[in-house]
Image (cartoon, helix red, strand yellow):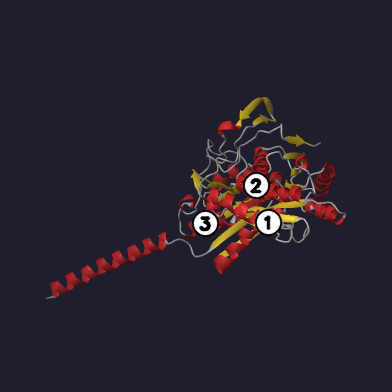
Amino acid sequence: MKRVYITTALTCIVVLAAFVGIFRLLNLNSGKDHLIIGFVYDNDESTPYTYNFSLAKDALEKTYGKKVEIYTCSNVLDEEMEEPLRDLAGNKNCDIIFFNGYSELVRKLAPEYPDTEFCQTSYMDMSDQTVPENYHTFKGEAYQGRYVSGIAAGVQIKQMIADGLITEDQAIVGFIAAFDTPEVISGYTAFLMGVRHEIPQAKMQVSYTGSWCSYALEKQATEKFIENGCVVITQHTDTIGPAIACEEAAQNGKTVYLIGFSQSMSEVAPATSLVTARICWEPYVLGAVEAVMKNRKIESVVSGHINGTDVFAGFEDDWVEMVDLNLQVAAPGVSEAMDQAIQEFKRGNGDFVFKGDYTGVNPDDPSDTINLKDGYIENENTSYPLFNYVLSDIVTIVE
């Protein structure tokens, strides 16, 4: 009888040990219940681009509450990235850090902190790059929002022509651009293609400010566009300068409309703001944090197009959206036309944007041209836009 008791006791101990082992394994795989998270901004939340990016931080706090501890560094220039990066990863022991700047230091320093995930908005084509396992890039497919913005502008201009405010040959739009990078050129070309879908004879003027964030230069460039007869203006810069210029023009009797990017301009330009396109950073940031909490690879959790550690998506995964359509100024049919284009993108169709009887010229190499008769697919293998050709027949660069 004693042998039976001993055998039973030993069996119970073995089973108990197995259960303890399994519990520990499950507990380990279940992930973390608290994360330390860092955000590094190139500007501060008073600027549209950074404000829009900060909405992802707000979403984290709303979703996880006390389960996350967040540190924020603002106004960090690319060349000044090293100190805050080392502080967040080395001193604050952040589990994951998000960057909206373009510094290459992030990728270079990531291997020194293998326990930290580094997630940076893409600034170059990473499809053929070798990157550390803990370095990730991401971006919404902005060209989709730009194209839909162009649709809205085109419908608005058609109404202006119908009302006799302008003639067909006065269908001119303006684009305030920071630099002649592929990201910027891709955006303004997609915008023009949207406009020309509605107004085939429309043309565009582009002004490069030489700065991502200069209120004075952006406002000055917008004022020149208005003098040149541009009737719809949008931007790839980071201040409210264009909005203020459009609103002042409207107060002086000029008919001009503004399409925002990143942040709605309806509060500062209620008479001229038409609609705003924004990249939604929340889906990636929330997905990446969920992955780290569950001890899973980020790219296995985030929804989107995935190439290595690079992730990108558009309207179909809510990475891009149109916000704050101003019904007080929008022409009839603007909302319906935008929705129709958005549905095309949601169905996975995007090859119609960069397509038509157009020839583009690479501004860095005039001998490099592209014929768009067969079309060009943007964001095919990378989150960073690569279309870098100016359609010089219908685009005028204003000095």
Residue 73 in view here: no
Q: Position of residue 7 (x, y in %)?
A: 17, 69
Q: Which comes before the other along the chain, label 1 or label 3?
A: 3
- Type of amino acid under label 2: Arg
Q: Residue furthest top?
A: 367
Q: Which comes before the other along the chain, label 3 or label 2?
A: 2
Residue holding disc 2:
146
State left or right for residue 213 relative to residue 291: right
Q: Position of residue 297 (x, y in %)?
A: 46, 51
Q: Which mark is residue 332?
A: 1
Quick one: SS at disc 2?
Answer: helix
Mark 1 to mark 3 CA distance (whole Å): 38 Å
Q: Nearer the viewer, residue 276 or 334?
A: 334
Residue holding disc 3:
287
Q: Position of residue 126 (x, y in %)?
A: 56, 39
Q: Position of residue 362 (x, y in %)?
A: 67, 30
